[in-house]
Image: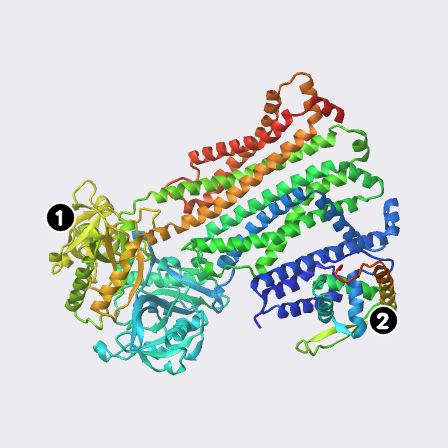
C-alpha cells in the first residue's frame, strides 16, 4: 500500500487537542483515520482529497470545541464566576453545547445574509486557493529534497572564467582527476556529460536516445540502484592501451534506464551482457537502473534531464589535454563537512592548476561548490518567492475585505450584542461567538480554496515555463494540505480579530442611548478606512508588478531575434560516423540530402548548424586580436556556431558586409570565419571588420590566425530577453567534416506542412538514420518567451484579483458610510444641497482613501519590484511610466467603485431619512 | 448534515448511533464508524475527531466502557482499543429507542408512514 502523506500530517494535527484529551484519545483516533485512508486507497484522487480535507476540518473543529470546553470548565472551576457566568453555568452544563450553539448561531446569521456569506466565502477561497497553488510550487521546486540519497550533501562544481565573463564552464579530464585527488573533504567527486545518439536495431525503428556519460561512481553517489544486472565498476571505464584502433577497443559499458529497457527491450532480463547497436555496435549492457531516475544538473550546464542510456566512457586522463573541457562535476560532501571547508581545498586545487596551465591563469579560472538543489533552483527562486509574496498579499487583501464586511455587520448588530451582554453574555462568550462565525466562514472558504488551487495547478502546468525545474512534480500533498489548513485558520483569526475586539468593547449605555453616529462609530469608521487604505496599497504593489511584466512581455514580443523564425522548419539528423566513417562520405550524404530537400515544393533555402540559437544549448570558444599573443588576458569568449554554407539564407539572417561561406571555402575552411555585428563592433570599433586577422582556437589546442570573411546580423541565442554574447561562425568542414547538425528549411509557406516531405526524403536516402525534434523554429522562440509568459500570467492573475478585491472593499466601505450618513445627507438636501454636491462629497471621501492607499502602495512598490528585476525585459523595475499608468488606472477604477454608493446617496429622500432619525 | 437536535435524555443522534453499534457486540473505533455508516447507508458518516469526542462523552457519562487493546482480526491484526456498552448505557439506549418508537407509533397512526409518502 502506498504511504499516505496525509496520515503523517493527521497525526501532527492531533496536537491541536488539549494535552489530557490527546493522551487519552489521539492514538485511537489516528488509527481510525489510517483505516479510513486504507479503505480509500483505491478511490480517485479527488475523493481522497475531499476526504482528507473534511477529516482535517473535523479535527480543527472538534479540537477547537474541546479547547473551548477546557477553558470554560476551568473558568467555572475557579469559583469566581461573574453573576452572568454563574447563571449561564447553571443553564448549560456542557461546554460542547455552547460551541454547537455558537456554530448554529453563526450558521443562522449567515443564512440570513446569503449574499454576504457567499461573497465572504468566495473572497477567502480566492486568497486560500492562490496561496495553496503557489505554496505547492514552493514545496515541489524549492523545498522537497532532490530524489537522491543524502541529497543535502550533494554539490555541483561551477566553473567560471572571470576574465572572459564565462560561467557554467566545464572541466577537462586531467583537471577533474586533480580535483578529485586534492579535495579530500568530498566523499566523492564524479563527472558527467550528456549527448544524444542514434540507437538502431534489427527489428525496431531507429531512435535517438539521450546518453549520459558518467564516471563509474556517479550513479552510486546519487543513490541509484540496479534493478537488473549491476551498476558500473571502475574496470568498465578503464582506458584501452595506447594506440589501439577504435574498432578493436574494448566495448562501451552501458546501463539502461528502466524506461528504455521496458519500451524497447520489453523488460527482458536476458539483455544483461548483450551487445546493442550503439557506439558502432559495440556497447555491452551491464545493468538497468531503477525507474524514474533523472539527472538534475544546473540548467546552465545544458544537460539532458531524462536519460535513456548511462555510459562509462574510457577516458585516459593521463593523455587527455587540459584545454579540452566537457566534464560537469558533482560531488558529495563528507558528513559534517561544510561547503565552505571543501571550497577552501578546491580553491587550493584550482590555484595549482592555474600555476601549471597558463590559459587557466589568463582566463581567470575559478571553481565554486554549490549545493545541488540550490544551484538547480537559483534562477527561479526569486520568482517563486516573489509569487509567494504576491499571494500572501492577495490573502491579506481578502482578509481585510472580509474583516470590513464583518465590521459593517458588527455595527449593524451593535444593539444585538449590547442586548446580549445586558442579558448575561460574558465578554469571552461574545468574542467566542464572533470568532466562531469567522471559522464558519473560513472553513468552507478553505475547502473551496483547495478546489481553486487544484484547478490553478493544472493551469500552471499548462503554462509550461521551461526554466522551473521539477515543476511536473507539483501537486497537493500532506504538507500542502497542512499549509492550507494553517492559512485558513490564520485567515479566520486575522479577519475575525477586529470584529471580535470591536464586539467585546461595545458600550451598552452609549449604544442604547445614542442612536446617531456614536463616538465609537467614528472610531469604527477610522478602522474601516485604515483597512481599505491597506488593501489599496497592497493591490497597487501587485498591479505595478503586473504592469512591469506586461511591458516586458510586449518588449519581448517586439524583439527581433535576428532570424525569420515563422518561416523555418528545423529537425535533427545526425550522420552516424560508423556508417559514414570518411568525411568525404558524410559530405556526399549531406550534399545529397540538401539537394533533395531544396527540391521540395515551397523550399527557398536549406542550411544546417550546431547548435541552433534559442535551442537551450550554447557552445563558446576563445578569440582575440593579435594583441593576445603578447597578453593572453585579452582573450575573449564568443558563442561559436558551426554552419553550412546556406545557414544565413535559411535563417533569414542578413549578411551586413563581406560574404558568407561558399562551397569553395570548404577546402580552406579553417582559415576563414564569419563574425556577427556585435563582435565586429566591439573588436574593431569604427573600422571595417572584413579582411581583418584574428586569433582563434578551434579544433586545435593552439591559437591560430583566421581571416574575417563577412559580418552578419546578430542572432539572439542564449536568451531572447538579452542581446547576449558576440558570435563567431565556423564552416562545418573546419569542424572536422559534417557531424551532428540541426537542419533548417526556409519556406514561403507553412513550415509544419513540410515535415512529411522531409521524413520521406530521408527515408529514401537512408532509412536507418533517425530524424528527431521536427518542429517549427518559432516553437523555440515561444519557449524562450516562456519564463516571461509564466511570470506575467501569474502576477497578472494575482494583480487583477487583488484589484477586484480592493475595489469591492472600497465599495463596501463607502456603501456603509452612505447608509450611516443617510440622516446627515437628508438634512443637507433639505437645506438645499444639490445631488451634484452630495455626489462629490462621497466620491471625494472614497478617492481620498484610494489616493492614500495609492501613495503608500507606490512607495512600497519602489522597494519591492526589485524582486522581479531578473524577469524584466526592456523596462526598469522603477519605470515611472508604468507606475503612473497603474496609479491612474487604479484611481479611475476606485472612482467607479465610489460612484455607485455616491449615486445612491443622491437619491436619498430627505423626508424619510429624517424619519429614520 | 445530520439532525443535531437533542432530546430529554441528552443523546445526540451520533451518540445514539454509537450506543446502537455497541449493543450487538464490542467494537473498536473504526468498526463503530463502519457500522454506523453501513446502517445509515452513508447518510451519517462522522469523521474520527467527531467520533472520538462523542465516545469520550459517553465514557465520561459511564454509558460506554473502554476495554483493553487487542488485535483486530479484520484490520491486519493491528492492536485496537475496544468499547463495550455498560448496563447504564444499555438502559439509556433502550429508553431512547422506546421514546422514538412511541413517536413512530404516533406517526404511523397519522398515516405519515403510508407507502409512497416517505
Q: Residue at x 44, y 67 (%)?
A: A332
x then y, percent, for residue A538:
55, 40
The C terminus of chain A sits in image quarter: top right
Please, what secondary structure does the residue beneath circle 2 have?
A: loop
Please, what secondary structure does the residue beneath circle 1 have?
A: loop
How many numbered markers are drawn? 2
The N terminus of chain A sits in image quarter: bottom right
Mark 2–mark 1 Cα distance, whole angstroms, equals 105 Å
Residue neighbourhood size for the residue with mark 2, other residues' Cα within 10 Å, grouped as few (<14), some (14–19), many (≥20): some
Q: How is the image coloured?
A: rainbow
Decide if residue A841 is on the left or right side of residue A660. right
Q: Residue at x 79, y 31 (%)?
A: A510
A743 vs B27: above or below: above
Specify the subunit that label 2 lies on: B
Residue neighbourhood size for the residue with mark 1, other residues' Cα within 10 Å, grouped as few (<14), some (14–19), many (≥20): few
Out of A133 and A318, give the one closest to the viewer.
Answer: A133
Out of A279 and B86, give the one closest to the viewer.
Answer: B86
Q: Quadrant of residue A731?
A: bottom left
Decide if residue A853 is on the left or right side of residue A376. right
x then y, percent, for residue A175:
32, 66
Q: Quadrant of residue B65?
A: bottom right
- Tell me whether the residue at label 2 lies in contact with that at label 1, contact meaning CB atoms closer than 8 angstroms: no
Out of A354 and A828, give the one closest to the viewer.
Answer: A828
Q: Residue at x 88, y 48 (%)?
A: A86
x then y, percent, for residue B112:
81, 58
Report which residue position mark 1 lands on: A691
Out of A706 and A57, give the one closest to the viewer.
Answer: A57
A326 vs B70: above or below: above
Decide if residue A543 is on the left or right side of residue A51. left
Report which residue position mark 2 lands on: B86
In this rendering, which labeled residue sits more in front, label 2 or label 1? 2
Tell me if I can see residue A612 in this picture: no
Amino acid at each position: 500500500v502506498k504511504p499516505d502523506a496525509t496520515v503523517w500530517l493527521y497525526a501532527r494535527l492531533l496536537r491541536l487537542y488539549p494535552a489530557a484529551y490527546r493522551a487519552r484519545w489521539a492514538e485511537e483516533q489516528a488509527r481510525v483515520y489510517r483505516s479510513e485512508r486504507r479503505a480509500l486507497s483505491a478511490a480517485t484522487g479527488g475523493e481522497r482529497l475531499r476526504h482528507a480535507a473534511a477529516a482535517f476540518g473535523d479535527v480543527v473543529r472538534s479540537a477547537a470545541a474541546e479547547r473551548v470546553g477546557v477553558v470554560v470548565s476551568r473558568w467555572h472551576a475557579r469559583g469566581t464566576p461573574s453573576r452572568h457566568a454563574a447563571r449561564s453555568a447553571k443553564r448549560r452544563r456542557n461546554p460542547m453545547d455552547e460551541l454547537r450553539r455558537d456554530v448554529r448561531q453563526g450558521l443562522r446569521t449567515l443564512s440570513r445574509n446569503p449574499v454576504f456569506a457567499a461573497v465572504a466565502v468566495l473572497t477567502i477561497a480566492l486568497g486560500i486557493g492562490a496561496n495553496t497553488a503557489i505554496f505547492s510550487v514552493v514545496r515541489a521546486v524549492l523545498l522537497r529534497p532532490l530524489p537522491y540519497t543524502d541529497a543535502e550533501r550533494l554539490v555541483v562544481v561551477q566553473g567560471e572564467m572571470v576574465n572572459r565573463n564565462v560561467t557554467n564552464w566545464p572541466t577537462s579530464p586531467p583537471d577533474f582527476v586533480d580535483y578529485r585527488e586534492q579535495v579530500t573533504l568530498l566523499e566523492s567527486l564524479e563527472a558527467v556529460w550528456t549527448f544524444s545518439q542514434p540507437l538502431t536495431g534489427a527489428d525496431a525503428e531507429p531512435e535517438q536516445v539521450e546518453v549520459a556519460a558518467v564516471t563509474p561512481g556517479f550513479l552510486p553517489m546519487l543513490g541509484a540502484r540496479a534493478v537488473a544486472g549491476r551498476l558500473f565498476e571502475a574496470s568498465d571505464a578503464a582506458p584501452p592501451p595506447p594506440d589501439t584502433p577504435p574498432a578493436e577497443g574494448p566495448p562501451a559499458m552501458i546501463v539502461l534506464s528502466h524506461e528504455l529497457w521496458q519500451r524497447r527491450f520489453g523488460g527482458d532480463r536476458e539483455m544483461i551482457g548483450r551487445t546493442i547497436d550503439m557506439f558502432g555496435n559495440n556497447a555491452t549492457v551491464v545493468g538497468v537502473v531503477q525507474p524514474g531516475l533523472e539527472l538534475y544538473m544546473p540548467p546552465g550546464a545544458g544537460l539532458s534531464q531524462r536519460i535513456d542510456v548511462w555510459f562509462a566512457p574510457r577516458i585516459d586522463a593521463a593523455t587527455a589535454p587540459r584545454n579540452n573541457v566537457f566534464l560537469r562535476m558533482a560531488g558529495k560532501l563528507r558528513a559534517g563537512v561544510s561547503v565552505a571547508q571543501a571550497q577552501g581545498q578546491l580553491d587550493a586545487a584550482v590555484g595549482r592548476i592555474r600555476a601549471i596551465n597558463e590559459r587557466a591563469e589568463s582566463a581567470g579560472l575559478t571553481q565554486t561548490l554549490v549545493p545541488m538543489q540550490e544551484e538547480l533552483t537559483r534562477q527561479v527562486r526569486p520568482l517563486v518567492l516573489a509569487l509567494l509574496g504576491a499571494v500572501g498579499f492577495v490573502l491579506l487583501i481578502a482578509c481585510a475585505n472580509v474583516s470590513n464586511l464583518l465590521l459593517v455587520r458588527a455595527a449593524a448588530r451593535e444593539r444585538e450584542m449590547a442586548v446580549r451582554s445586558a442579558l448575561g453574555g460574558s465578554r469571552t462568550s461574545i468574542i467566542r461567538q464572533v470568532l466562531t462565525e469567522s471559522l464558519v466562514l473560513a472553513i468552507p472558504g478553505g475547502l473551496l480554496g483547495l478546489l481553486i488551487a487544484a484547478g490553478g495547478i493544472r493551469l500552471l502546468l499548462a503554462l509550461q515555463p521551461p526554466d522551473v525545474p521539477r515543476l511536473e512534480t507539483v501537486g497537493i500533498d500532506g504538507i500542502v494540505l497542512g499549509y492550507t489548513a494553517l492559512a485558513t485558520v490564520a485567515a479566520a483569526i486575522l479577519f475575525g480579530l477586529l470584529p471580535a475586539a470591536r464586539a467585546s468593547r461595545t458600550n451598552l449605555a452609549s449604544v442604547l442611548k445614542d442612536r446617531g453616529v456614536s463616538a465609537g462609530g467614528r472610531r469604527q469608521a477610522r478602522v474601516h478606512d485604515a483597512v481599505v487604505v491597506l488593501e489599496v496599497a497592497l493591490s497597487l504593489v501587485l498591479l505595478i508588478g503586473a504592469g512591469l511584466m506586461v511591458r516586458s512581455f510586449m518588449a519581448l514580443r517586439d524583439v527581433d531575434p535576428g532570424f525569420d523564425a515563422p518561416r523555418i522548419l528545423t529537425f535533427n539528423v545526425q550522420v552516424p560516423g560508423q556508417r559514414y566513417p570518411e568525411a568525404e562520405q558524410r559530405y556526399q550524404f549531406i550534399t545529397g540530402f540538401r539537394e533533395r530537400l531544396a527540391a521540395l515544393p515551397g523550399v527557398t533555402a536549406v542550411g544546417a548548424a550546431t547548435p541552433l540559437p534559442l535551442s537551450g544549448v550554447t557552445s563558446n570558444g576563445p578569440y582575440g586580436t593579435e594583441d593576445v599573443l603578447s597578453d593572453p588576458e585579452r582573450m575573449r569568449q564568443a558563442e561559436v556556431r558551426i554552419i553550412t554554407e546556406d545557414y544565413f539564407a535559411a535563417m533569414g539572417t542578413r549578411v551586413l558586409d563581406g560574404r558568407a561561406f561558399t562551397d569553395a571555402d570548404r577546402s580552406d575552411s579553417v582559415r576563414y570565419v564569419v563574425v556577427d555585428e556585435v563582435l565586429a563592433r566591439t573588436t574593431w570599433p569604427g573600422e571595417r571588420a572584413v579582411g581583418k586577422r584574428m586569433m582563434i582556437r578551434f579544433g586545435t589546442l593552439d591559437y591560430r590566425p583566421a581571416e574575417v570573411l563577412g559580418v552578419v546580423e546578430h542572432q539572439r541565442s542564449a536568451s531572447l530577453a538579452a542581446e547576449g554574447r558576440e558570435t563567431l561562425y565556423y564552416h562545418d568542414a573546419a569542424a572536422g567534416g559534417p557531424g551532428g547538425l540541426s537542419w533548417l528549411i526556409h519556406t514561403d509557406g507553412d513550415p509544419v506542412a513540410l515535415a512529411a516531405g522531409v521524413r520521406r526524403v530521408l527515408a529514401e536516402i537512408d532509412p536507418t538514420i533517425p530524424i528527431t525534434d521536427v518542429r517549427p523554429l518559432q516553437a523555440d522562440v515561444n519557449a524562450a518567451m516562456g519564463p516571461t509568459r509564466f511570470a506575467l500570467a501569474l502576477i497578472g492573475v494575482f494583480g487583477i484579483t487583488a484589484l477586484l478585491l480592493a475595489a469591492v472593499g472600497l465599495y463596501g466601505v463607502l456603501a456603509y458610510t452612505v447608509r450611516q450618513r443617510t440622516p446627515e445627507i437628508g438634512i443637507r438636501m433639505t437645506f438645499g444641497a444639490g445631488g451634484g454636491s452630495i455626489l462629490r462629497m462621497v466620491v471625494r471621501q472614497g478617492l481620498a482613501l484610494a489616493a492614500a492607499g495609492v501613495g503608500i502602495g507606490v512607495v512600497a512598490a519602489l522597494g519591492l519590484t526589485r524582486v522581479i528585476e531578473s524577469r524584466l525585459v526592456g523596462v526598469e523595475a522603477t519605470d515611472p511610466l508604468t507606475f503612473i499608468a497603474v496609479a491612474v488606472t487604479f484611481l479611475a477604477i476606485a472612482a467607479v467603485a465610489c460612484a455607485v454608493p455616491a449615486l445612491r446617496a443622491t437619491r436619498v429622500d430627505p423626508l424619510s431619512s429624517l424619519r429614520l432619525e | 448534515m445530520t439532525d443535531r437536535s437533542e432530546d430529554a435524555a441528552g443523546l445526540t443522534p451520533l451518540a445514539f448511533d454509537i450506543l446502537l453499534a455497541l449493543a450487538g457486540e464490542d467494537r473498536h473505533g473504526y468498526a463503530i464508524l463502519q457500522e454506523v455508516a453501513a446502517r445509515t447507508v452513508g447518510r451519517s458518516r462522522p469523521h474520527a475527531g467527531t467520533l472520538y469526542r462523542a465516545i469520550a462523552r459517553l465514557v465520561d457519562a459511564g454509558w460506554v466502557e473502554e476495554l483493553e487493546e487487542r488485535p483486530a482480526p479484520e484490520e491486519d491484526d493491528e492492536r485496537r482499543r475496544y468499547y463495550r456498552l455498560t448496563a447504564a448505557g444499555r438502559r439509556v439506549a433502550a429508553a431512547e429507542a422506546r421514546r422514538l418508537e412511541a413517536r413512530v407509533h404516533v406517526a404511523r397512526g397519522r398515516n405519515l408512514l403510508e407507502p409512497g409518502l416517505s
